[in-house]
Image (cartoon, rainbow, N blue to C red):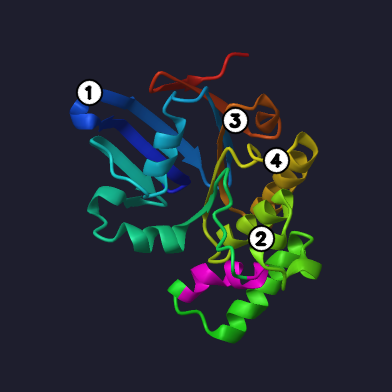
Amino acid sequence: MNDLAIRTVDLVREYEGGTVRALKGVSLEVRRGEHLCVMGPSGSGKSSLMYLIGALDRPTSGEVWLNGRNLEREPDLDAVRATEVGFVFQLHNLLPTLTSLENVEIPMMALGVPRAERRRRAEELLDRMGLSHRRDAIATKLSGGERQRVSIARALANRPAVILADEPTGDVDSKTGGQIMECIQAARAAAGATLVVVTHNPELSKSADRVMMMRDGLLGPASP
């Protein structure tokens, strides 16, 4: 158990009063430092699984354990997300009027990180993403690939143990997508973090330690 970053037990997630069942008893174990890719078509339940693992939602039934903590017993999921998880979404969700540097600083402000340390850490992350020269550019002046790299830097700002990426290359071309995945992989390796990528794109599974398939709310091994 101590070597597990993520553990789910018989997860069920229902919507619309139980008429829609997105997850149908999903059990999963992910080791610390592992890179797992969850494949599946749109509507298969993979994003619902990620939201539960990342403490963005609570299950209808079942358990989610994150770094040894049972999320059912955590009264403040906001605090769990802020300290344990970094999210990379298909849409970057940057604040459009803020600079790259300011966007990366936002998660640290929520934890009360001193201004000088916020600035130092944000500059370091943007440098790692190859964006030192764009740190003072506002989000609306960035390209799609640059925005996504800023969002990766933001996801790493609070040094999370778990990185969750939901279709992280879905909004960019294939070349830029490859660069984005390289950034995510390098960041994961540098931090020793656990990485879970959910996607329908088989290209994103090639670098994973393990690949699983989500179909109709059920999770199982990917076909060879």
Task: From this view, report whether residue 185 is shown above or below residue 123.
Answer: above
Whichever of callouts 2 and 4 sits on the residue coming sooner in the sequence is 2
- The outermost residue toward the left is 17
Q: Give the residue type that dot 1 points to.
A: Thr
**Left or right: where does residue 44 sit relative to residue 88?**
left
CA gap, disc 1 and disc 3: 32 Å
Whichever of callouts 1 and 2 sits on the residue coming sooner in the sequence is 1
CB contact under 8 Å: marks 1 and 2: no
Place residue 14 in its image quadrant: top left
SS category of the residue bearing label 1: loop
Q: Nearer the viewer, residue 204 or 151?
A: 151
Q: Which mark is residue 19?
A: 1
Tag in front: 3 or 2 = 2
CA gap, disc 2 and disc 4: 16 Å
Q: Which residues are magenta?
A: 99-109
CB contact under 8 Å: marks 2 and 4: no
Q: Nearer the viewer, residue 33 or 120?
A: 120
Q: Nearer the viewer, residue 9 or 176?
A: 176
Q: Give the residue type that dot 4 points to.
A: Val
Quadrant of the rendering where the N terminus is positioned? top left
Q: Which mark is residue 210?
A: 3
CB contact under 8 Å: marks 1 and 3: no
**Left or right: where does residue 10 sit relative to residue 205?**
left
